[in-house]
Image: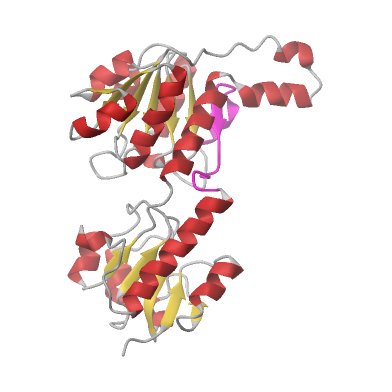
Amino acid sequence: MKPTGIALAHALPPALKDGLARFGEVKVVGRDAAAMAGCSVYVTTPSGPVDAALLQAMPESLGLIASIGVGTDHLDLAAASEHGVQVSNTPVVTEDTADLTWALLMATCRRLTECERLLRQDDWAAAHTVLGSRVHGKTLGIVGFGAIGQAVARRARGFDMEVLYYGPNRKESAEAASNAQYCADLETLLARADFVSLNCPLTPATQHLMNAETLAQMKAGAILINTGRGPLIDESALVTALESGNLGGAGLDVFEFEPQVTPALLGFDTVTLLPHIGSATGECRMDMALRVMGNIQAWFAEQPIPDNCTAR
């Protein structure tokens, strides 16, 4: 019989912790592998990385890493498979992240945070001198055309936009739903798009995808949106591009050195900054909680885990 203990990388909301308690004892252990003794499930999030060293140190009883969130870049899936540990995620953030992508795009293009700041400072006249960028009728370039990228593209139809996308594979079956056009190379997309949205996963191939060279390839005055992962962008190069004026602005929900923000980014009125809140709606967080509990329930019942990342 499997040990019923559940180890947590971080403290969780009381309702979720209470829900997990029906499977067994729940305790917060951080990265202390010794404290995981008697546990067979380790619950973590993107801010709690699980690398090969931690997997090596985990007790043999631990057979499932249940991650809350859709990304898996914080998890060493190869090492998990090597150690016979299964990994699950909670891929239920698509629509809420797409909504936030558009919120960032609109706020950055229309410079809403700057206007609000001036209004709160009782400077109505100064706020009226701030001019943003038109959104409707422009060209949107989406890097990464998975579930979230496709959801972002569908929303563009209401703005009568031309939609381009780039990724390792063309997805012709998904193009019709958003009238999107495939670009065979990133350079073509960057040269044509007024707005570029990063919706791809973080992998060794995509780390610093947006760097000095690719940022220079963007259309003059274009705006960059990132709701994917922070290290997709070389933030030092981003600061330089913003200072040069070639880049029109940026909307960022994620950061290269999260939770730290590159200090220079705080000084640009053309940059909108959010603290990684793509899934931060009550409904989405409830969906995530139910999904992680469903994966854990399947594990204890010795049934196939619905969101088994190591089986993909």
| Residue 57 higher or lower than 142, as above or below | below
State the image coordinates of residue 132 (x, y, percent, origin top left): 57, 14
| Residue 25 left/right relative to 282 | left
Residue positioned most to the front: 177
Q: Nearer the viewer, residue 252 or 19?
A: 19
Magenta region includes residue 3 = no
Residue 166, quarter of picture:
top left
Residue positioned most to the right: 122
| Residue 183 higher or lower than 84, as above or below | above
Q: Nearer the viewer, residue 211 or 151?
A: 151
| Residue drawn where x is 43% and y is 48% of the image | 93
Residue 171 seen: no
State the image coordinates of residue 124 (x, y, percent, origin top left): 78, 15
- Range of magenta residues: 262-280
The quadrant of the rendering that contains the N terminus is bottom left
| Residue drawn where x is 55% and y is 48% of the image | 280
